[in-house]
Image: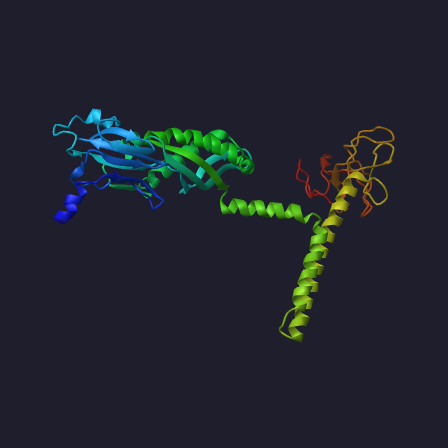
Amino acid sequence: MSIWDSIKTQFIEVIEWLDDTGNTMLYRFPVHGQEIKNGAQLIVRESQAAVFVHEGQIADVFTPGRYTVDGGNTPILSKLGAWKYGFNSPFKAEVYFINTKQFTDMKWGTSNPIMMRDQDFGMVRLRAFGIYSIRVADPRAFLKEIAGTNGRFETEDIEGQLKRTLVSTFTDALGESKIPALDLASNYEELGQIARARISNEFMTFGIEMTKFFIENISLPPEVEAAMDKRTSMGVLGDAGRYAQFQAADAMRAAAENPSGGAGTGAGLGAGFAMGNMMANAMSNAMSQQHQGQNAVGDSGAGAATVKCPKCNASNSPAAKFCNDCGEKMEVASQTVPCVKCGSALPAGAKFCNQCGAKQEKAKCPNCQAEVAPGAKFCNECGTKIENE
């Protein structure tokens, strides 16, 4: 700096700051040798505050207005105590301008998913992002706790600290809210108000106030969202039979638009018809099986299988436990025994086989007269060979 520039700075009479950056939170007015002339004019504009620092201590904070630095109207002069050369001599002090406007459109987001327990999906991972606004509410605290002796302090210098504090507090508020994941979208405003109140308390330790807090989106993992989309699609489709017909028609239309020529068109049409027939047959078979199952359980009319009562020989449903004519217990009818000759399954108590006509009497050993099980080749008492007819 030249001698003339040094002389000019000794006689600064107007101290003011015009911010043309939009993101500067603090600016230290450049004074050569930190000497301010007595009688200088201090201009503090709206959305600004001026902080005088003398001998390393905050002497005073000036709100918007015009001030004359002399012994008459500024409280700072009573605190400096360094006017031993009279009121016409300069004094050493630092002037910091604090930007008290709102800093808007500051973005926040979760760098890692938030783990929480949901009543619909169980354990889920959520991500969230949004915007917020801040302003300096306490210039003294901001200068002491954050800015320090920096000549210029911008939002980028503290944005990382604010984001981490914000996300940590928001995560705690989200977990305690117990709001189901499917209902979060309808509770963004309420959740934002709860989170803002908590976050503001943390920010005030820096002399900063959170003025706005907005949640733009809270999302589930992509695989969970894909599963939800499939479930939603099934609900939108409605009638599966009509959807199969639509798919077949769509396949035929795509085949007809195939530009590969006549052969390609024919193959495409054939594939479309085949796909349509396969889907239609599958739907038809499924519906037929369903109707058959219902008829087998609930319909006792013609064509349904029946069993006869062991007492009165009346026809009954295979699932019946008692005869619907005489009330006889039907458990015997549901039991089967093999035919003594051909081995066919016969109802317990049958006297003749309905396949080979053999009489169903227990054979006896010709040697010891012990009863022998049907189809046995040797007596289990004496070992004599049994001649089966």
Lateral position of residue 45 relative to residue 305, left or right: left
Q: Position of residue 215 (x, y in %)?
A: 48, 39
In this figure, what is the number of numbered marks? 0
The extreme top residue here reads 78
Quarter of the figure with residue 112: top left
Lateral position of residue 344 relative to residue 22, left or right: right
Scheme by which the image is coloured: rainbow
Seen at 29% across and 37% down, the residue is: 97
Q: Position of residue 10 (x, y in %)?
A: 17, 40
Quarter of the figure with residue 152: top left
Q: Position of residue 385 (x, y in %)?
A: 69, 43
Query: Is residue 285 among what the camera can see?
Result: yes
Quarter of the figure with residue 373: top right
Lateral position of residue 265 relative to residue 334, left or right: left
Asked whether 71 or 97 is in front, the reply is 71
Query: Is residue 388 among what the camera can see?
Result: no
